[in-house]
């Protein structure tokens, strides 16, 4: 339904008074009659169930199947011209793909891919982000689709790549001014991201061994306040922080990272902290020891 909804958003000609503001209480839905979704089939019974239990009976307009469904309040009141709506049904996406082509819509998910909100793992991660973390960005939402998500506490979550493709996607979303990223120094394994990890550092800039400072925005500064290049040292394994010790967080992430390599439980592993280009030594943890932290 993602495709069909995006297509219809381009198609505004069915609304009378185009170009003018009009008061309207209709809910648009991209679902098609008899189109099977990952959560429930889009047949008349399920559509009626949604209307009856949503509190919006008669107000949900499905533009792509409207002509083969009962009229909505908006259609009855001539706010929408029903003759310009569609009578599409079934699982085929040929008509919608052709419509997308005509309207110039080229960037859309693969048809029949299903809605992410009906995916149990994605929904669980989204709920955690909204109810536990509470503050998040668009990038944080995209991250929900990739890797294993492990929550250490209400402020700290790590994302662990599950495959080379995962690693590539996580690396693309890495922000060197906000995040901490690490991987095993020698062995093949996951990229591990601590989203907004640099934001956990004290609000005041701190001295690190080479005489550089790290500001609260994650910007590297020299001792005289000049900005350092991206190749400069961002973090050190022995800097001090008021409150939460970022070293402990990095080490926890490192033990989890090592656990997803060929390193055996309890063995030492060298972890490269990419955000700073230095290494730490940790003892690997088997994945089942932190299974309870998985989101």
Image: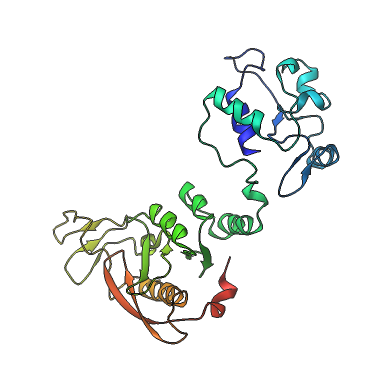
- In this image, 79 relative to 212: left or right? right
Q: Quadrant of residue 276?
A: bottom left
Question: Image point 82% across, 27% down: which residue?
Answer: 69
Question: Image point 51% across, 57% down: which residue?
Answer: 146
Whether 152 is drawn above or below 170: the answer is below
As rendered, which of 72 and 114 lies closer to the eye? Answer: 114
Residue 158: image location, x then y, percent = 47, 65
Whether 231 is drawn above or below 9: the answer is below
> Does the image show residue 200?
yes
Q: Quadrant of residue 9?
A: top right
The C terminus: image quadrant: bottom right
As rendered, which of 277 and 200 lies closer to the eye? Answer: 277
Q: Quadrant of residue 27?
A: top right
The N terminus: image quadrant: top right
Q: How is the image coloured?
A: rainbow
Residue 274: image location, x then y, percent = 31, 65
- In this image, 278 relative to 14: left or right? left
Marks counted in the figure total 0
- In this image, 89 relative to 180: left or right? right
Residue, far top = 17
Residue 253: image location, x then y, percent = 43, 72
Question: Image point 43% across, 67% down: which residue?
Answer: 190
Whether 250 is drawn above or below 84: the answer is below
Question: Image point 51% across, 35% down: which residue?
Answer: 107
């Amino acid at each position: 339904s993602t495709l069909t909804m995006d297509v219809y958003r381009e198609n505004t000609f069915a609304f009378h008074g185009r170009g003018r503001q009009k008061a309207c209480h209709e809910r648009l839905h991209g679902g098609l009659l008899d189109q099977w979704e990952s959560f429930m089939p889009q047949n008349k019974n399920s559509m009626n169930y949604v209307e009856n239990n949503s509190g919006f009976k008669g107000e949900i307009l499905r533009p792509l199947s409207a002509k083969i469904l009962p009229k909505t309040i908006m259609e009855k009141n001539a706010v929408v011209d029903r003759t310009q709506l569609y009578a599409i049904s079934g699982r085929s996406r040929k008509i919608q793909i052709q419509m997308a082509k005509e309207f110039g819509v080229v960037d859309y998910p693969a048809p029949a891919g299903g809605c992410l909100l009906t995916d149990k793992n994605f929904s669980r991660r989204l709920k955690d982000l909204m109810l536990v973390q509470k503050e998040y960005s668009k990038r944080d939402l995209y991250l929900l689709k990739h890797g294993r998500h492990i929550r250490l506490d209400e402020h700290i979550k790590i994302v662990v790549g599950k495959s080379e493709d995962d690693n590539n996607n996580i690396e693309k979303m890495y922000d060197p001014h906000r995040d901490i990223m690490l991987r095993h120094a020698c062995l093949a394994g996951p990229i591990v991201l601590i989203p907004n990890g640099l934001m956990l550092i004290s609000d005041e800039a701190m001295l690190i061994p080479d005489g550089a400072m790290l500001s609260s925005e994650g910007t590297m500064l020299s001792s005289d306040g000049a900005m350092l290049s991206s190749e400069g040292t961002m973090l050190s394994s022995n800097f001090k922080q008021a409150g939460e010790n970022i070293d402990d967080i990095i080490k926890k992430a490192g033990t989890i990272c090592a656990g997803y390599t060929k390193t055996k439980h309890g063995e030492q592993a060298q972890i490269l902290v990419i955000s700073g280009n230095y290494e730490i030594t940790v003892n690997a943890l088997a994945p089942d020891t932190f299974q309870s932290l998985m989101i």
